[in-house]
Image (cartoon, rainbow, N blue to C red):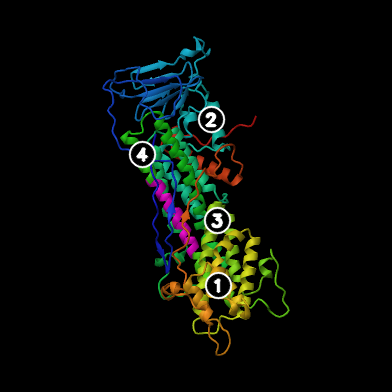
Amino acid sequence: MLSGERKEGGSPRFGKLHLPVGLWINSPRKQLAKLGRRWPSAASVNSSWGGNSRARSPAPYVDTFLNAPDILPRHCTVRAGPEPPAMVRPSRGAPVTHNGCLLLREAELHPGDLLGMGEHFLFMYKDPRTGGSGPARPPWLPARPGATPPGPGWAFSCRLCGRGLQERGEALAAYLDGREPVLRFRPREEEALLGEIVRAAAAGAGDLPPLGPATLLALCVQHSARELELGHLPRLLGRLARLIKEAVWVSAPHRLQPHLHPEGVPEVPLTPEAVSVELRPLMLWMANTTELLSFVQEKVMEMEKEADQEGLSSDPQLCSDLELCDEAMALLDEVIMCTFQQSVYYLTKTLYSTLPALLDSNPFTAGAELPGPGAELGAMPPGLRPTLGVFQAALELTSQCELHPDLVSQTFGYLFFFSNASLLNSLMERGQGRPFYQWSRAVQIRTNLDLVLDWLQGAGLGDIATEFFRKLSMAVNLLCVPRTSLLKASWSSLRTDHPTLTPAQLHHLLSHYQLGPGRGPPPAWDPPPAERDAVDTGDIFESFSSHPPLILPLGSSRLRLTGPVTDDALHRELRRLRRLLWDLEQQELPANHRHGPPVVTPP
């Protein structure tokens, strides 16, 4: 079976805010062993009976030998478990037909099926376990459902299916307009198809559901994994990842692209409304790429599993394919990390101008009552509305884009981390040489902070906010202690009651606390000799580089590719893409051989 490891991502800089976001992705794949294999010199077809073991074991025993120029040393494998049906799988690059159709993937094998080996051998399969009994009519007249070659034109091109022209036209029409989550294409149309999906998604065309682009791209991946030759999927993934990366850069807000904003030209002030409009394309790509990456991981794991069953885990070509898959997934990782970094940078840049009001505004305005938990944004004190407006805009945006819940919590975790560090640093800076640390001012700040935390609790973000605002809350709590109680406290008791503050931060707050004209800090507040060095050399400011790492969500994709397509907008886009592919196929034919899109005749 196949294996591999994911890599950690880098961290670009955006403006003056450095966001070194780390990236960890757990993967069940292990490092590939690039070992060659010595094949037997005789040409052969191998078959395996008596169960389907998934354990890593030597290659199946070869018991059928053929000799022809186009027969590979290991041409195909027939496996049969305790119960029918048997399974047939071609080896990489081996020409095999199944009931007249080129066999590219593993398929069910039933009594009466015809297997062609290259240009010189044709076999009819008979299951030795059935005791001679078999179907009255060979299954290759007509072909079994699902045995059709890729591309919508199969309904007209197939000459072995036993259908009449009208019946084939009706089958094609049913596919073109149907709601089955299937998108068939030939490799030659892949580039046009992927480009059209990504282009439409980037342009915001139509009214697709938020995860519609990922769903359509996943259908392309699924078709490649099921219908096309083994080496096709890695190439498709590489092309797809590059297209998404290019589209994301184009979708980035102009403020994040220096060449679009010359120096010396003042920027328009940021508002929550502008944030929602400019960040929506970026957030949509983050949501879609996350789900697509999870889906791709599942398909690559299936690819490894199939190779293990065939005993081909050390096949050099297979190892090369897996490396291409890893490179494609690393590009998708990079897209998610970059969109996350750009999103939080843009949001924190907006918060930067609104947060100082939490330290300066007075919530106790004349005649006004403080709002209770769950209050609407409009009921909050004017000084808090801009900051809460940014949080509300971000929350609505993540919901509208159906961003993965793990990424939603990490987005707000970073916003709250930035808010806590920014406010605490402002609090430390404003106490230097100015009468700022006093009980009356601290009560206003504490009330503002409580109102913000209550509002976030009502928005479902209370636990995350409490965790990341803990240090600011503790610093404000210290300043809210009544003066008489504070004077009775000692350094050791204050350190115990405020453990999140560093010795340097605690000493800074105490040494600048306003006790009254001519009164200095009492001796009980002096740090002991053991902590004097930490006080003298410690930094009173919070570092913005100590933020939590970005950890991509693991597990199954939320994309659902089973059952009929129920969303009408997604169905319309699926129909449009199918007819686009049909048109591309028809353009290759002579004019007198072309057909218009078939229409089902009502009964």
- Per the rendering, the mark at residue 408 is 3
- Viewer-closest of 312 and 142: 312
Residue at 46% from the left image edge and 33% from the top image edge? 226
Q: Earlier in the sequence, mark 2 or mark 3?
A: 2
Q: Which residues are magenta?
A: 327-345
Q: Earlier in the sequence, mark 4 or mark 2?
A: 2
Asked whether residue 446 is drawn in magenta, I would say no
Residue sticking out furthest to the bottom: 518
Q: Main secondary structure of the magenta part?
A: helix
Between marks 4 and 3 in the image, the one whose residue lies nearer the viewer: 3
Between marks 4 and 2 in the image, the one whose residue lies nearer the viewer: 4
Q: How crowded is the residue under tag 4: few (<14 C-alpha within 10 Å), some, or many (20+)? A: many
* Dot 2 and dot 3 residues touching (CB under 8 Å): no
Q: Quadrant of the C terminus?
A: top right
Q: How crowded is the residue under tag 1: few (<14 C-alpha within 10 Å), some, or many (20+)? A: some
Q: Quadrant of the N terminus?
A: top left
Q: Amino acid at mark 3?
A: Val
Residue at 41% from the left image edge and 20% from the top image edge? 48
Between marks 1 and 3 in the image, the one whose residue lies nearer the viewer: 1
Tell me the residue that label 2 is attached to: 169
- Viewer-closest of 574 and 273: 273
Q: Earlier in the sequence, mark 2 or mark 1?
A: 2
Tell me the residue that label 1 is attached to: 494
Between marks 1 and 4 in the image, the one whose residue lies nearer the viewer: 1
In three-dimensional space, the C-alpha distance between marks 1 and 4, rounded to whole angstroms, equals: 61 Å
Asked whether residue 334 is drawn in magenta, I would say yes
Q: Helix, strand or loop at disc 4?
A: helix
- Per the rendering, the mark at residue 321 is 4
Q: Helix, strand or loop at disc 1?
A: helix
* Dot 2 and dot 1 residues touching (CB under 8 Å): no
